[in-house]
Image (cartoon, grey):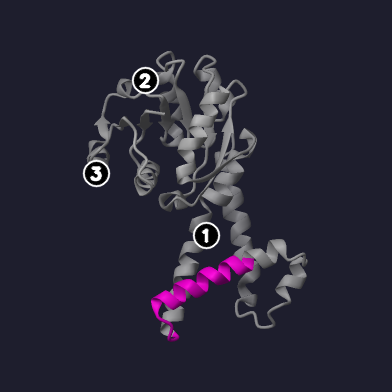
Amino acid sequence: MKTIGIIGGGRITNIFLQAFKNVNISFEKTLVFDINEGALNNLKTKFPQITITSNLADVVNAELVILAVHPPVTVETLEKLKGNLSANTVLLSLVPKINIEKATAILNGFANIARMNPSASSIINKGVNPIAFSASFDKDKKAKLLNVLQSLGNPFEISDSKIEAYAVISAMGHTYFNFQIQKLKELAVSFGMDEQEAAKTISNMLWGTTETLFNSGLTYEEVTDLVPVKPLAEVEETIKGYYDQYLKGIYNKIKP
């Protein structure tokens, strides 16, 4: 794909542009639309090669149009796109709540709609990026799109009905652990490790934890019994209660 138009100049656009930059992916033209001039200027400073615009019409003829707006303005934005997208264009929505069926209806049956829920680790090209496609999506265009998205991490196809589940578990998942991992690093340093030792040890521990839990063949109870000392045992039920309360709450809020 030679041209890309991004609607929205926020965090996710910054992630995409940085991921492309990391692996030297370039397009003949990269256009970014936003009504916020400050956001556009910040992106232009960081990524001088892009073209910024406050005119939505400038981006609609790109081969790939990425919808990266907040859910409350999604329908309004799709209404503005209706009838203006080229038949050769692929529309990739990064927005939860508005599924492909609804987007297709708003766009009067526009064929090539995909929906993806990227994770923040895409910024270092290690994203967890589930993607769903409309039933009418052109096969050649799908291959081209996946080739572009490969640079963000490994995109994998799922049912559109699962996008919101992935949004809560993988896209928001970093936020459940970042502060805990950072605290472990700080404690490790206070205990005498240097920062490099701490980072390596915690990274390996986390990898080993998931491998043991999911791929050892042991039950959950058997895995938890491998370590006799559990310093956080007294607060485990409280923490799990927070997961139930807040994650179920956000899922119910964003699901179609």
Magenta stretch holds residue 29:
no
**Secondary-structure class at tag 1:** helix
Residue 238 seen in render: no
Q: Left or right? Give the position of 58 relative to 170.
A: left
Span shown in magenta? 191-209
Q: What is the three-letter code of the residue carrying label 1?
A: Tyr
Q: Position of residue 90 (x, y in %)?
A: 47, 25
Residue 229 occupies which quadrant of the picture?
bottom right
Q: Position of residue 240 (x, y in %)?
A: 63, 63
Q: Which residue is tagged 1?
A: 176
Q: Earlier in the sequence, mark 2 or mark 1?
A: 2
- Position of residue 141 relative to residue 255, above or below, is above
Magenta stretch holds residue 201:
yes
Q: Which residue is tagged 2?
A: 61
Q: How many marks?
A: 3
Q: Position of residue 161 (x, y in %)?
A: 64, 35
Which residue is found at the position 60% from the left and 80% from the top?
A: 231
Q: Position of residue 254 (x, y in %)?
A: 55, 40
Label 2 and label 3: CA atoms lie apart by: 24 Å
- Position of residue 188 relative to residue 177, above or below, is below
